[in-house]
Image (tube, rainbow, N blue to C red):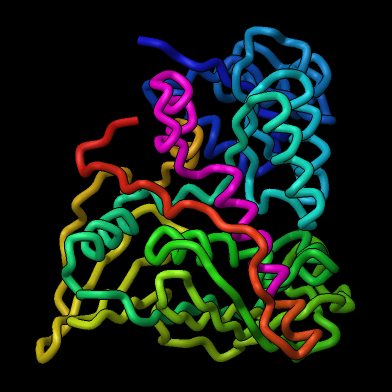
Amino acid sequence: MSKMKVGIIGCGNISAAYMKNVPNFEHLELIACADIDLDRAKARAEEFGIPHAYTVQELLNDANIDIVINLTIPAAHAEVCIQVLEAGKHVYVEKPLAVTREEGLRILEVARRKELLVGSAPDTFLGGGIQTCVKLINDGWIGTPIAATAFMMGKGHEHWHPDPEFYYAKGGGPMFDMGPYYLTALVALLGPIRRVTGSTGISFPERTIKSEKKRGQKITVETPTHIAGVLDFHSGAIATLVTSFDIMGGTQLPNIEIYGSHGSLRVPDPNTFGGQVMIRKNGSDWEPIPLSHGYKENSRGLGVAAMAQALISGESEAHRANGDLAYHVLEAMHGFHDAASEGKHYVMQSSCERPAPLAPDTVL
């Protein structure tokens, strides 16, 4: 069975999940990892039995590597993705695709020129939870989708994260932190976005770090921490999305609900692969629906596996967590902020295909 050889750049916290999961996918073989701190790469290689620990340049020079997973910090995503593409390798990057729209477009342009694939997290929409919801919508269980609501409501990362400053700097905030999960799920469920609008605010201009090691240090907030948005989809559906770091008292709001002409669908947390799916037909109570698809546990790397399947089979639709989808989501996130600043709708300049659903018995 054909396998694509994989290297990982960036050996921080998130790398452990990929290093654990990648070897379990049928078409992937993890052969190398790299980091700007070579000792950290060596430690990860020893921990997970990875054959090679490289500097970044050594990994780029390894002709055996087909796909590179880019797990660097967001500010480095574009630079590293372009380096990988220029080295002649396909690239899959953690969310977001890039920090700016200009960087995102540059990645896609280089990929087209080099005839290579770009993929991007999140791939949680390929998990059993959201794929079950996709199937229910496609099979007509709630009729025609009319509207949706989505809520990511929390009190901020300073309460638990050891280095929370980034989340309150420009390029951070709840939309760029968690928005990719929610927007990617909504596109998977409802299709591409036509336009967005929104309002933003900074409820607490200064934050005090509650977590160790920086307990008591102050953070000056430079980016909106509460974003309320409205999305119009090409399908005709209208969604409300709220992302916030300002909800100190908690909430009982659902993560995502889809409202159709014949019923409603409650979608599990898009930051997970499984979760509980609920449906309510007109006149009935909420009922749980068993998941129809696999990959219910943490399956980070599923998008890379789908990319490998597309490369091996030649079936482009198999590459579901693709660059066009990731850029569409990136543009929408900026669109909310632009709309709030300018007091008008932001009309999307990009589009993408609604990702092809997985068959219930898919094994990647």
**Res 130 → quadrant:** bottom left
| Image spot of residue 181 (x, y percent) | 52, 61
Q: Quadrant of the N terminus?
A: top left
Q: Quadrant of residue 142?
A: bottom left
Residue 67 to residue 223: above or below? above
Does 171 sit left or right of 174 as displayed?
A: right
Quadrant (top left, top right, bottom left, bottom right) of the C terminus: top left
- Image spot of residue 291 (x, y percent): 21, 55
Relative depth, front residue between 195 and 321: 195
Q: Residue furthest left?
A: 284
256 in relation to 354, above or below = below
Please tell me which residue is depicted at 84% across the width and 68% down the height of the picture. 169
Relative to 172, 219 lies left or right: right
Q: Is residue 269 left or right of residue 51?
A: left
Q: In this view of the protein, which residue sits in the foreground, 100 or 289?
A: 100
Residue 37 rendering spot, x and y as whole percentages: 83, 30
Residue 160 visible in the shown view: no
Residue 252, compared with residue 186, is above or below; it is below
Which residues are the magenta region? 306-335
Q: Where residue 360 appears, x then y in whole percent? A: 21, 44
Q: Nearer the viewer, residue 255 or 339?
A: 339
| Residue 293, placed above or below residue 289 | above
Q: Is residue 35 magenta?
A: no
Name the dominant secondary structure of the magenta segment.
helix
